[in-house]
Amino acid sequence: MGGIFRSFPTAFRIAVRRLNGNRRLMAAVAIGVVLAVALMASTTIYRNALQDLGLQTDLRRVSDAELDVRILNAAHGLSGGLADESFDTIDRRLRIPSEFISDTKHSLTTATFFMTEVGGVPPDEDPRDRARVLWFEAVREHIELVEGQWPDPTPAATPDQPPVIDVAMGTEAAASGGFSIGEVRDIHASWRDDARPIQIRVVGLVRPIDYNDRYWGVRRDHFHVPVEKTDAFAFFAPRSTLIDAMAGYMPELRARLEAYARVDRSAFVADDAGVAAIRFRAAFEAIAKEIERTRVETEIVNVLKDYETKEFFSSIPLLVLTLQIVGIVLFYLVLVSTMVVDRQSGEVALLKSRGAGMGHIMSISTIEGLILVALAMGVGPIVAREAIAFLGYSPAFEGLTGGTRLSVELTGEVYIYAAIGAALSFIALIWPAWRSNRSTVVHHARSTSRPEDKPVFQRYYLDLVVVAVGALLFFQLQESGSLVTEDLFGGLQQDPLLLIAPAVFVVTVAVLFLRLFPLLLSAFGGVARLLGGASTQMVLWHLTRAPVQPGRLALLLIMATSLGMFGGTFGATLDKSFDDRAAYQSGAPLRLADLRSSGASADMLADDLAEAPGIDRVSYVIRQNASFSRGPLDVTDASVLGVDPESFSNVLWYRDDFALDDVRELIDRVTAPEFEVEQIVIPADATYVGMWIWLPDTSGSIGPSLRLQDSKGRYRDVRLIGLPRSRGFGGGELEEGWRFLYGVLKDGSGGPHIGPWTLQNISIRSGGNANFSGSVGYDSIQYTTDTELPEDIINVGFRDSVIIESFEQQGRWTVFTDTTRAGALPDDARLSTAQARDGEYGMSYRWNREVRSGVPRGVRLIGPDAALPVIVSRDFLVEAALDEGQLALVGMAGVYIPMQIVGAFDLFPTWDPEDARSLIIANRDYLSYRINRNPATLGAGTPNEVWIQPTDEEGLRQLRTFLEVTPPWKHDIYDVDAIRNLQDEDPLVAAGWEGLLFLTFIAIVLLAALGFLVASVLVAQQQQGEFAVLRTMGFSLPQVLLVVGIEKLLIIGVSMALGTAVGLQLGTMMLEFVGFIETGETVLPPFVTVTDWATIGGAYGVLGLVFLGAIAVIVALYMRMTIGQILRIGAE
């Protein structure tokens, strides 16, 4: 060992000379080492940049009001220093996450007082003026004093004497309440009557400098102008006024105590997101524990937790791809290093023949490797930093960086990863040198004359070990079903062995190829002997004789091509998946959901959107919860989607793999049969509707009503009035007999009510004794256009009326059939002469069985009773134990509707299969009719979603503006483009992938091109003798070109074809194991494999140009040799 150290200066000089002598070749090696170090360093740089960008993006997407911390106690005591103690506790606990909080402000708002003129008494009922006194810390910095002065603190008071306190108030509130400077009012405690009022004196009028300032938070009652009965005037006062004066006089006085902590977005670093969440949570839990009835309002913890989850799952595919890139770089180093060593084998043999030991020779190779590694450690991280920063100019990050460089930095972690890359590169360089340095002069001479036909790992069957490892990892992947595993405590973690599984899979295919490559060449050789010429046979003979060198080159091309295909397939599939996820979530290009439209019908919704711009096609949809029950404990929950088949198919986004049948054919199956319902019409000019009802002598309650449908299709219940208040609502008694009850047509909630109307049913709600048994009679339903009613209308009816139903026609009415699971109500409804008041017949309605509480009784017009045709999700069939073609009685909105299953699907837009509810799709109009012909929940069977296909991008923009500025109703909006833009702007979702794939393709093209060029030139130099012999035998330039071209094209063609196939298979395989989105949930809809042939074709085109250039260089090298050189080479 001492000899080695003493010879270090000599070894160093030799190493430097060797590097200089082979500088062109070593430059290729140096590029590989730098690339390996840069890639390892870029993994950390890129991840850190994405993490920081992702966290800041998530924080920016949450408003200040949602992000800031609001600690609230709605009824906190003020006396005895309680408020000070609580504020101290809050401040102390908020020191835990203090580095993430920029400022904290306190406030107090007293309980509500009733306000009167001086000496006045508050009325017993509203309307009553109310008042609250506020103190806000540092409020004077955020308001402008318009008139008067800021109130001075009021001296401390005692329970014996009410104080007079000076206050300030907003200018608009003062104008609304008639306040002026010097105005005095009494404020009376709303919680006690025995206390004398406190007097307030207005000494200042103020207004906010910027009411949108973050200081004011989410509250908007500081300068409030009361408009509702419970509103209160707000008055500002100093803190001591509330605590010493007001609470001194009323020790029981309580106030809303608040602390508002402003969260500093810039203080968050991605690596500390988890720690920050823990600190905030610990502070909040401690505050809630120490101050009773205190709640904390903020989204900061949820934002940080969601970010951590997203970062964890988003990093997995990135790691998989990065590991494969690094693996190929290392193989490139092994390949080029082996070629360098083979070229230097003569020098090594000469040194060993002159007494150099293994240690001396290895010291030279070690020094060479260390020099290259040291160069890479200095240059690699800088290259990685600049490459990652350059991505800020790419379209993927333009929305985040504004077209500037990404903000990146070199941290200690970066150099740790760079050192790992350098160590792996050093091993890749030294391993071939160590193997070669063991050979002797005899071995060198033998290998020169007879090249090895098998590499070492094939001779010792090490390739089969690699295959076994690959099979084991693939089996483990199949068993786990994911790259994510659970630790001992149930937490999620990334399995490093599973992460390298894709790279091992590529290596497995590659080593199998090397074993099969000679057999493949032999097969080609047999074909060439029969069909090919001399050039082809010579190429195959040469490759068969020495397959190791071309096999290594083929291996590099296979790995590079497979990774390129994997990246192209995986990236294109993810991009397609982002599009599909946005479309699946929305269902249509634009979907308005959860409409708060007061039960508006489809026609009314269409009227509301009549002036909306940019709408090409539209469909109005019902979404309603439902359930199917086989027994008390066997219930299948579902959501029912009521659609108009024709319009819905025109706006629906769908994919063919969602069901076995075509979507339009499936939706067409829910087309309901043509049905007509007899109509009893009330004209538009009618003002009242009424009927004669025979009421029994009962102490129970009976509340009758009529269900009507207006000209726009909206349903409403018109309650019939006229009975004494207790009669209709329980408890009263009235002699039996005929009574005329009536309802108002154009008044009531949910207006305007515009006729004409059609009568749907007559219902009664019974209570008390009447719920078990009873009877009523119906006769002469009529309307009037009069605006005034007789005083004794209950006995005489309308003065001037038109009868629309006289109950003279048999078979026109039936009892409710859908309000119970058992079918029709167990009641009796028939036309009877004994129950007639006017004409020959009237209707007798009797019941003697109790029904479920809240279920109304009654009759409806006869109509179609055919089952509702539906298509259902397959999980509904499984859970409900049903098959296609069977009937299911589904309960929804208080009614039970028979549904016939006419089709099934696996997925449907807007439906999550992991949700607790299955999905049923039915005909909208028939569904609405079946629900609303019975006294179901009003408005249940009406559209509550609008699915829209815009005209074009400009139309979509105009429509968005219309819905934001003048929305016809409150709604939630799902916009495919908006959802997709959020994905694109998220560094941890789409943007991160696009950037990494860009770097991947650059690295692959560079490695494959450089490796092929270097290998080709080195092999050409080694084969100069063989081609010299060919030239002496008379081979012409075209023949030489043909030999070289066939050899290279054969290697390229076979390698790239196999690499393409492997990459496609690898992409498809890995999609099965990363089938989750950035939040850890299952990808919905599932991935559909897509290959970006345009990008891959471009990469292949660049490689093709490089390959042609390499062939040209080789041919030129051979053709430049003179006859003298050829003879000299032949002599050697």
Image (cartoon, rainbow, N blue to C red):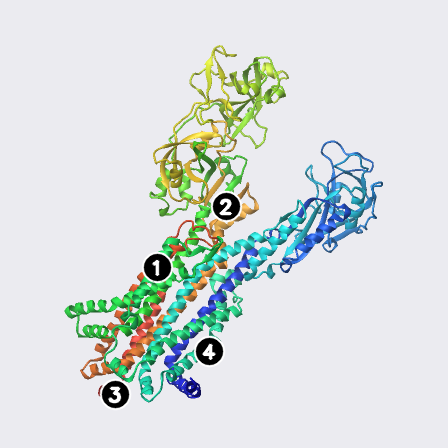
Vertical arrangement, residue 539 with respect to residue 316, above or below: below
Q: In which quarter of the image is residue 1032?
A: bottom left
Are the residues flagged by discs 3 and 4 in contact, CB closer than 8 Å?
A: no
| 921 relative to 691 in the view: left or right | left
- Residue 527 is left or right of residue 459, and the answer is left
Q: Mark 3 vs mark 2: which is more N-terminal?
A: 2
Taking depth in this image into account, of 882 and 139 the one nearest to the observer is: 882
Q: Quadrant of the N terminus?
A: bottom left
Q: What residue type is labelled 4?
A: Ala
Q: Which amino acid does label 1 sit on?
A: Leu
Q: Do the numbered discs 3 and 2 sit on residues whose CB atoms are within 8 Å? A: no
Q: Disc 1 or disc 2, which is closer to the eye?
A: 1
Whichever of labels 4 and 2 marks the residue nearer the N terminus, that label is 4
Distance CA(mark 1)–CA(mark 2): 60 Å
Q: What residue sits right under mark 4 in the picture?
A: 374
Report the residue marked by disc 3. 1125
Residue where numbered disc 1 is placed:
472
| Label 4, label 2: how far apart the Cα atoms are | 65 Å
* Disc 4 versus disc 2: nearer the observer: 4
Q: Mark 2 points at which residue?
A: 613
In primary-sequence order, the first of circles 3 and 4 is 4
Distance of mark 3 from mark 4, alpha carbons?
Answer: 40 Å
Q: Pick the quarter of the image with the C terminus.
A: bottom left
